[in-house]
Amino acid sequence: MTRSGANRRLVLASRNVGKLNDFRLLFAPLNIELVSVTEFTDEDVEESGATFIENALLKARHAAAVSGLPALADDSGLVVDYLGGEPGIFSARYAGEPVSDARNNQKLLEKLSGVKAADRTAHFHCSLALLASAEDPAPLIAEGRWLGRIAEQLAGGGGFGYDPLFLPKGLTGSAAELSSAQKNSQSHRGQALQQLVPAMANWVGFVFNE
């Protein structure tokens, strides 16, 4: 893809259905079609980076290579202060294989057992990487952070991942109890995308000029 092309499709470097749905809602006002990398390959790229942004770039380059489309990758996770930053970049596989939100949440609750509310502070972190092609030397980068703390029990049936345990700062209830609109307006992904969109206006101006 060239930066003045006419492609309104982006490939999302994720197999996570919840994440894909979140991003489709966020991109809908921009008239951009977001497709999953699963439409092009069953192969996963090894997330060998030491940081969220390093892993986001690895995933974006892989998705762009297998799809031939510009690629968006999100590497995000939960950072718990009391646990020295765990689960961090290992959030999706915190409890090991097989990957399971329920098992990850259970492990987190066990590790915080007996920890008082004031010491259960945490935040969600999101790093976004947008590439025009697999070889793009100047990717667009954006990051967001959503402050809160970890609850003592699960609440809510929405969202995914650690949402039922995450209590956003300044709100009552968990992230899993928010509507999609509420979540996207203030979440770590929503914040990162708010940074990314102005840069996209110059990067792929046709999206906004028609």
Image (cartoon, rainbow, N blue to C red):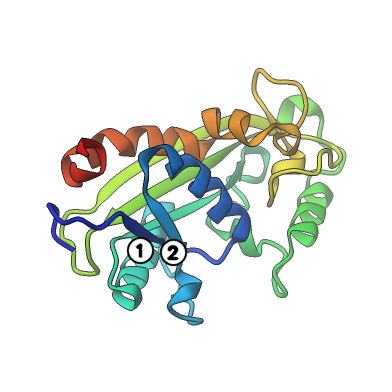
**Residue placed under numbered mark 2 in the picture:** 13
Q: How far apart in space, not on screen, are marks 2 and 1 (Cα)?
A: 6 Å
55 versus 29 height, above or below: below
Left or right: 34 as drawn, with respect to 5: right
Residue 85 x/y as whole percent: 58, 46
Rendered residue at 67%/39% (across/down): 82
- Mark 2 surroundings: few (<14), some (14-19) or many (≥20) residues within 10 A: many
Rendered residue at 50%/49% (across/down): 24
- Callout 2 amino acid: Ala
- Mark 1 surroundings: few (<14), some (14-19) or many (≥20) residues within 10 A: many
Residue 71 x/y as whole percent: 33, 61
- Callout 1 amino acid: Ala
Q: Secondary structure at mark 2?
A: loop
Q: Secondary structure at mark 1?
A: helix
- Asked whether disc 2 touches disc 1, contact meaning CB atoms under 8 Å apart, the reply is yes
Left or right: 63 as drawn, with respect to 207: right
Q: Quadrant of residue 92?
A: bottom right
Rendered residue at 37%/44% (across/down): 31
Residue nearer the viewer, 52 or 184: 184
Residue 75 x/y as whole percent: 47, 54
| Disc sitting over residue 169 in the figure | none
Name the image quarter holding the C terminus: top left
The mark tally for this picture is 2
Outermost residue to the front: 210
50 versus 201 height, above or below: below
Residue nearer the viewer, 173 or 86: 173
Mark 1 or mark 2, which is nearer the start of the sequence? 2
Q: Quadrant of residue 170?
A: top right
**Residue placed under numbered mark 1 in the picture:** 60
Q: Is residue 191 visible?
A: yes
Q: Is residue 120 visible?
A: no
Left or right: 174 as drawn, with respect to 88: right
